[in-house]
């Protein structure tokens, strides 16, 4: 089973990257399941039903999210009806939406970290409970949406041998550490992003600089022109054991 995981899709340039790159990639690499983080898909903040449908139309099977999932409230009905758009699992049971989905027996799970992100339920214990409830599924794929590489690595090692993949999202910066942990779990600290290259994690550099330089909250705008990047990581998973056999970055760049 070959799985591609795509980093945070940021605004129109990010959606354009997926439109341009993914359909060919899906054929060439013979991908079975494609997971993409869509928390910044609509103008950089949140995701709408239209942008979700657009991303699905390019060949994405499951959209994960993170701290920005609540930015566009119109997504909430879709979170409730459309099981393929996830919010993080470690929210209270009463929170709208679902933290996981079953795709032909493969469980895709979305978690959110706590270090420099927010006061969420413990993602480690949330996974313990989840794994206890889902012992039959052989392949489990985790998107851990978190800021600190240490928290993501700790979760990777904690789940090593218990899930197939632990892939980080949220920083929008692709890391060069994709590997197979000792008990067979595929791991990467951050998938990266699909978005504008000449930006600070997708946003206009000037807006971000102003925040740092004068310390007054500024609204961020998102870069719409210039070269665009597509960041993802491919994982080959053994269907019988659920362990990862190969992991490889799949990154592309083009003029938008
Ligand atoms: Fe993001
Ligand atoms: Fe995020």
Image (cartoon, grey):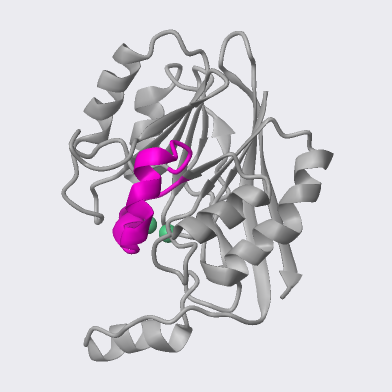
Would you say 101 lies left or right of 19 here? Answer: left
Residue 85 placement (x, y as % from top left): 45, 43
Q: Indicate yes or no whether the magenta region holds residue 73.
A: yes
Residue 209, above or below 43: below
Residue 103 placement (x, y as % from top left): 54, 26
**Which residues, given as a range, are shown in magenta?**
64-85
- State which image quarter holds ligand 2: bottom left
| Residue at x-position 67% and y-position 81% | 226
> Is residue 145 something that shows in the picture?
no
Residue 254 placement (x, y as % from top left): 75, 69
Would you say 141 lies left or right of 135 here? Answer: right
Q: Nearer the viewer, residue 68 or 228?
A: 68
Residue 149, above or below 229: above
Residue 4 placement (x, y as % from top left): 63, 39
Classify the position of the N terminus by image quarter: top right
| Residue at x-position 39% and y-position 62% | 46
Q: Indicate yes or no whether the magenta region holds residue 167.
A: no
Q: How many marks?
A: 0
Res 243 quadrant in image: top right
> Is residue 112 something that shows in the picture?
yes
| Residue at x-position 41% and y-position 55% | 170
| Residue at x-position 20% and y-position 33% | 93
Classify the position of the C terminus by image quarter: bottom right
Res 96 quadrant in image: top left
Residue 24, above or below 127: below
């Amino acid at each position: 089973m070959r799985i591609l995981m795509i980093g945070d899709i940021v605004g129109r340039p990010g959606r354009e990257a997926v439109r341009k790159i993914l359909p060919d990639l899906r054929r060439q690499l013979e991908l079975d399941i494609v997971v993409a983080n869509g928390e910044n898909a609509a103008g950089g903040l949140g995701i709408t039903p239209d942008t979700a449908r657009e991303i699905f139309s390019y060949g994405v099977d499951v959209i994960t999210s993170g701290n920005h999932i609540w930015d566009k409230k119109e997504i909430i009905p879709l979170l409730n009806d459309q099981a393929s758009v996830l919010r993080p699992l470690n929210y209270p049971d009463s929170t709208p939406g679902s933290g996981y989905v079953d795709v032909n027996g493969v469980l895709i799970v979305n978690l959110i970290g706590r270090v420099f992100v927010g006061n969420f339920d413990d993602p480690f214990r949330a996974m313990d409970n989840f794994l206890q409830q889902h012992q039959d599924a052989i392949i489990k794929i985790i998107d851990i949406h978190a800021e600190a590489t240490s928290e993501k690595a700790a979760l990777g090692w904690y789940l090593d041998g218990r899930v197939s993949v632990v892939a980080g999202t949220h920083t929008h910066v692709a890391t060069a550490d994709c590997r197979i942990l000792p008990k067979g779990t595929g791991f990467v600290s951050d998938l990266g992003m699909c978005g504008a290259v000449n930006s600070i994690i997708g946003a206009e550099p000037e807006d971000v600089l102003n925040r740092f330089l004068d310390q007054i909250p500024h609204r961020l705008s998102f870069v719409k022109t210039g070269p665009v990047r597509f960041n993802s990581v491919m994982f080959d998973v053994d269907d019988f054991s659920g362990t990862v056999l190969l992991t490889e970055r799949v990154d592309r760049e083009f003029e938008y």
